[in-house]
Amino acid sequence: MVTLEFALSTVINKIAPLNQSEIVPLWESIGRILAVDVVSDINMPPFDKSAVDGYACRKDDLAKTLSVVEVIAAGKMPTKSIEAGTCSKIMTGAPIPKGADCVIMVEEVKEVSEDEISFTGTYIKTNIAPFAEDIKVNDIVLKKGLCIEPQHIAILAAVGGSHVIVSEKPTVSILITGDELVETDVKPKMGQIRNSNGHQLYAQIINAGAIPVYNGIVDDTIDATRNAIATALEKSNIVVLTGGVSMGDFDYVPSVLKELGVELLFQTIAVQPGKPTIFGVKGNKLVFGLPGNPVSSLFQFDILVRSAIKCLMGASKPTKDIIQIPLASDYKRKRSERLALIPATINSLGEVEPVNYHGSAHIFALAKANAMIIVPIGVDSINKGEIVNVRQF
Ligand code: AMP
Ligand code: MG
């Protein structure tokens, strides 16, 4: 049995990035991992630019009445220099005319006549964004390994990145074991339940940025399990199985993986839920065996498999952040030999509150959950208001 921290670092350290990239149109790069550094082809601002709507003039002239020599719209070049006693009306984003060293805001100006103004303010700010203060040509604006978010799309757009070089998506095969399982469109008979994990995994794989390959429900026999795993190993980068990894009479997954030459790096984790979680490698192929209960599968995928997918794509930050916030109510547990992951919600006060939860089969409790409270090994009670580690999912 290993700790969850050890399991996660084993996964991260074992995985080398695939180093395969593809070029996609800008809009399609959202959520993808950048495969190269991106450099700027421009200076930003490209010229000394007005930061406000107002009048470009000389600071020394602010006590005088100034005559307006032209109006400079954004996108237009000034045609007149600013001489003593003159100014140009200027819009936000327009180039500063020669001779001006400040822009007074339109709100702090009074019209003296049709083409004369005077400054009514007291505090003088320059209001000029100088040439290249944000970015210079050839500066790196985004680093390889970044997961592209909307603000990065803006940066790419600003530097002419109409196409973006991103890491190829790994493929992840889903194998569901369990003779008690039927698919969604079937009404379960006595003794049966619907397969929820398979579809949850499909959604999680897409969210993690990979390509799911759904292989359906595998019979709980050694032959069927072996054939399904062998085929999935050939056609995908990662194989994720659920069920059949525990101590039951029909839990064939660990023995079949060994038979197929998969090196198992851990088989049980001191965590609840998710104790019977397996990770193995065969060459550059990765296999995860997740427990059958949907909450266990959800959490262990989110922590381990998601990180594996990000590592394969060369993400510079493969794991999610842990946040520290106060607990909304007292927490107690009877046994503390495993780390506990408690489904919870973050309330409007910024506290984290456990949801009403009957155990790892209780997927319905997760309808309201968006976070897990991490209770360390050895801790059996936490008081309301104490700061706890929380992982959002
Ligand atoms: P196992 O890990 O195979 O021992 O299964 C543990 C529990 O999870 C059992 O109650 C299974 O019926 C349930 N289970 C297994 N696979 C799934 C699945 N794909 N969807 C929903 N529940 C499952
Ligand atoms: Mg089973």
Image (tube, rainbow, N blue to C red):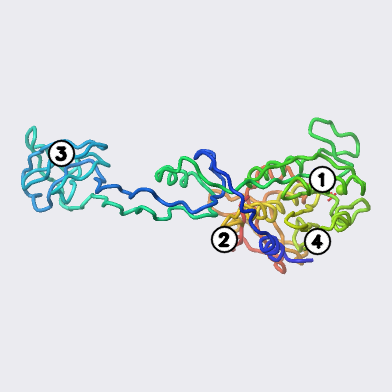
Which comes before the other along the chain, label 2 or label 3?
A: 3
Mark 2–mark 3 Cα distance, whole angstroms, equals 57 Å
Mark 3–mark 4 Cα distance, whole angstroms, equals 73 Å
Residue at 55% across, 51% down:
35
Residue with the mark numbered 1? 231
Residue with the mark numbered 4? 263
Q: Is 115 on the left-hand or right-hand side of 128?
A: left
Which comes before the other along the chain, label 2 or label 1?
A: 1
Corner quadrant of residue 140: bottom left
Q: Amino acid at mark 3?
A: Thr
Q: Are marks 2 and 3 in contact (CB under 8 Å)?
A: no
Picture coordinates of residue 357, whole percent (x, y): 73, 49
Residue with the mark numbered 2? 324
Corner quadrant of residue 89: top left
Mark 4–mark 2 Cα distance, whole angstroms, equals 36 Å
Which comes before the other along the chain, label 4 or label 2?
A: 4
Residue at 94% across, 53% down:
249
Residue with the mark numbered 3? 79
For mark 2, give the secondary structure: strand
Mark 2–mark 1 Cα distance, whole angstroms, equals 43 Å
